[in-house]
Amino acid sequence: MAEIVLAPLLQVVFEKVASRILKEIAHRCGFNDEIQKLQRALRMIQAVLEDAEEGQATDKALKLWLTELKAYDADDLVEEFTPEALRQENDSTFTQQVSNIIPSLNPVITYLRKLPELTQIRQRLDVLLEERSCFKLKEKIGDKDMKRGQKRETGSFVIEPEVIGREEDKEQIIGMLLLTTERRAGRFVSVIPIVGLGGIGKTTLAQTVYNDERVMRNFELRMWVCVNEDFNVRKILNLMIESATGRRCDDLLGMDALQFQVRDLLLERRYLLVLDDVWNEDEDEWDKLKMLLKFGAEESKVIVTTRSAKVAAKVGTVSSHPLKGLSDDECWVLFKQRAFPHGQKDNPNLFPIGKQIVKKCGGVPLAAKTLGGLMRFKIEPAEWLCVQESDLWNICEEENGILPVLRLSYSRLPSHLKGCFMYCSIFPKNYVIKKDELIHLWIAEDLIHHTEERKSLEDIGNEYFNNLLWMLFFEDVKKNDVGDVIECKMHGIIHDLAKSVAGEEYFVFEGGCMPRNLTKLRYLSVVCDSGSCSIPEALYKAKKLRTLILLYPKGDLGEIPTQLFSSFRYLRVLDLGNCGIKRVQNTISCLKYLRYLNLSNTFIEILPESICSLHNLQVLNLSGCSDLIELPRSLARLLQLRHLIINGCERLTRLPGNFGRLHFLQTLPLFIVSNETDLRENDNLVGLRRLKLKGELTIRKLENVKREFLAQANLVEKNLHSLELSWGDDHEGLNLNMNNDFICKMGENVLECLQPPENLKRLSLKGYPGFCFPRWMRTLILLGLTKLELINCKRCEHLPTLGELPFLEIIYMRGMKAVKVIGREFYGEDTRRLFQSLKELTLIDFPDLELWWSISGGKEYPSLVKLTINKCPRLLNLPQFPSVKHLELRNCHEALLRSLVNVSSLCILVIDVFTGQLVLLDTLLQNNVNLMSLTISSCPKIRYIPPSLGNLVNLKTLTIRWCEELVSLPLQLQNLSCLQSLEICECHSLSAPPQSISGLISLKYLSIENCSHIRSLPIGLEHLSSLEHLMIMYCPSLVFLPNEWQNLSMLRSLCILSCPQLSSLPDSIQYVRTLRNLEIHGCPGLNVLPQWIINLTLLRSLAISDCPNITPLPDSLQCLTNLQRLSIQECPRLEEHCKKNIESSSCHRNRPHSDLTSPSDLQLLVAFSIYLFLECRAPEERCKEDASEDCLTIALFVLREDAD
């Protein structure tokens, strides 16, 4: 049942009516009285609104009254009074703004024309105010009263005959209850929270635990209290006594006497208390109860069930136990118990439909039981199909059903969160919601109100989001590397709840289903599930639409439909991201209410200047517009702009000036310093000074700053978590072959001025031309830094001091060509706790680096996990890395290995581009028996892999590439029983593969590529029972394949490429019935594709190319019913064979494919399709009407369908 939530909208209208600018305009234009009357009416409605919203669930007349109160028209009208004001300079005085508006005759006439509409709206509100007395509404002041409705009561008795799917959860909870823990000072009792959605089974799980025999034996006293929304300590104490004694407690008992009774009840007794269905977030109330619970014996436990992760976090003394959904199979069991209570199977046709209905449950047991009960008296398949095709919120409204239970969570929300939750109903199920985008949408639709001056709307929106997240309205959360939530989803059941309360104003258009009432529609998303992303014609009748979002577009709009501008003039949100738009028309200026415009990932090259007339625009998303070359020059006229999102706009070379005027701008991920000589054009970096930027910022072309004072951007005061500063080209930096001291000195001064904020998480410097790093990098200022990149800082001779940064996890340095020594300055003064959090360290292209100091005996890098050294040819030593697990050494001196012989913690080792014989590799392998991945590549002098390879019993991946003089692999290779992947490539001296690989029982992937002297595959191939993928490529000496293949019971893919001497395929391949992909390329020795190929019944893809001597295809190819891809290229004799088949039966050329159903027809159709496919290789010489790659697809479709 849809609910009416008016508070957010009326608050917006009230704030607009009460604004100074509108009052002054009304005063000067002569309709001040009308504005005051409207303001008074809105204030009186607001006073009783909360009571009315709470009462609508049980009073239909009241709900109709609320419907009439919808103030969209008032909001639209009031907003029309303000655009003229927004056109004024943001730094002009209030009086100047009004004075600039009124003297012009046209605005006055415009305002006066709207006066009758304003009067009409006010009169309608007056009528509704008179009707208010019929409902006996009360003004709400202070805290909310308890919600109307019957309270849910639970007890400890297990009602379910059998609890399905919770055995593991039950054992985990019981394990925590029986666990003996040390009693810590201040910890009164262990509290175990069970948290999950309404209906997920929290109470049922608590009941089964409560009544388990082990629990009953362990606790002297057990008490069950159903708390519900009213967390009343007196009530809870009464219920504890009643549950423990079985006697009702005296209601007249004073609090003091009651506390003594509870103390005596618990004193030195080990008890279990279950507090079921807790909503209270007030820690003071919890503390009152907590002080009494401490009188019990040690190992007393409390179980709290709650829908709120916030409650769980506040009361829990251990980690919460999140209760997940059941599987579809488990829900099916519950469903059957209700739908078929006596196990009848009179109508087996209902079972497949029932299993589809169960998928609507989303793993929620109560939903499965509700749906099962609903279907008990429906015996016709048509009735079941109707339920299958219906939305859950349309079929589960009974009092004890799933949606009323979930609606309790919704009813607990304040009005502002209800509106935000309703808005989420315009996303389809399983849609990945991006948090920042959602908050921007809420702001654009006036769902977030500025209640605190010190907080931005985005900060308040983040609080709204977190509150909904705590209440489990969102799930599947994804976080970024600094721990912030960036994405989430809504559980399917929660999505059904959102749709049930949202009503006709919100709609998701998908599958051609139209909304019932287009005149009421305000918020719309269109799921583009066809080949285009056009807007259905009928939807243009929704003239009052405020949000339009196109989702999953698959086609290209080209340009925005012109009808959109005329039909949807009240739009606040327009999201056309990924729609393939190439041009934006000037008429976009008609959307004067627009606040959110998403054109991301489109093909736009330029935006029209008219877009700068959208004076309400808050968000302009152009991310991923890789063709965009220029932004409108008048962009600074968008005074309300809060987020200019231009990530991935790589062709942008300059930005418009006057960014300093955009006082509300918070998101500006890319800033390009202009190279204009005119000072007014080049002052834009100084223009950043007043902006309150947040998040990420990249500043490019810093070499264009010619004067130090122009770099005063005041970054230190901004709330940035990521900063990139770049000079010159991103890849090479500045070209500094000439001795340009001015550029170097100016670079140092500029970087000194661009000191970032202390809470910065990520810093990247690219192409920095200075000799030394700034003072703020040499001192402990950036204490919160987690990642640092230094790229192409070619003149810096010393690294900055980084060792004392406590949270630094990743250091990436490349192109530091002047650094010769990594010395004490890198570590800092305090050597006791160096690099305590550092996990990844990368050094690339340090051509002059000779010495890397160790100053504390191997304790400098206690947490380092990954170390990469590349292109450091003169470096001969390394410090000790006691915990490194991932080591990559590339393009370095072999002597570097001496510093690593004592390392014993490696899991991944990469040795690449070493010119020596790697004599120390044996020692390195001996010391690292836990190695899981080993790569040796581009080591032309290595002749043997040491026998110690066989000791790596945990090795899963072995890759050997471009080792020209490698003669053989050790016999011990077959000891690697855990090996899953073996790749041998470009080892031309390897005349034979390993003599035996029969011991590689876990091998899944085997690739032998470009080994010119290998004549056969290794012995024991037939024993690789786990092998899934086999690739043999560019082995010109390979003559034959082993004959025994029948034991390769897991092989899925076989690829043979450029093996010219291979003359046949072993017959035993036909017994590999798991094969799904077979590719044969460049094998001129093959004359025929064997008939037995039709035995590979699971084959999905068959590709043959450059096999000039293959003639016919096997007979009965239509038996390959799973074949989805057939590719044959550059097989001239096969082409000739196909031509003959076509010529012998040319009548089939024009027959419809659907008529070709006999096996001979199908065979001919395949031959004909192959022929057409071959013809398509030179379309300019063929008839395009007959030559089409689509023919092959159609042929295979018919082959597959008719064979079934």
Image (tube, rainbow, N blue to C red):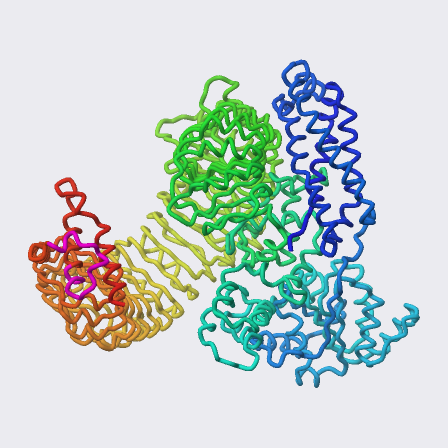
Please indicate, yes or no, whether residue 1021 appears anywhere in the rendered image: yes
Residue 353 picture location, percent across and down: 47, 69
- The magenta segment: 1147-1164
Tell me if 638 is positioned left or right of 552 in this view. right
Residue positioned 31% across, 64% down in the render: 958
Residue 804 picture location, percent across and down: 57, 49
Of residues 79 and 1107, which is closer to you in this image?
79
Tell me if 345 is positioned left or right of 484 in this view. left
Residue 1176 picture location, percent across and down: 17, 47
Of residues 850 and 783, which is closer to you in this image?
783
Tell me if 926 is positioned left or right of 1066 in this view. right
Tell me if 163 is positioned left or right of 726 in this view. right
Give yes or no for residue 1148 being in the magenta stretch.
yes
Residue positioned 75% across, 53% down in the render: 55
Residue 550 picture location, percent across and down: 48, 43
Give yes or no for residue 439 being in the magenta stretch.
no
**Dominant SS in magenta:** helix
Give above or below for 778 relative to 477: above
Q: Quadrant of the C terminus?
A: bottom left
Q: Quadrant of the N terminus?
A: bottom right
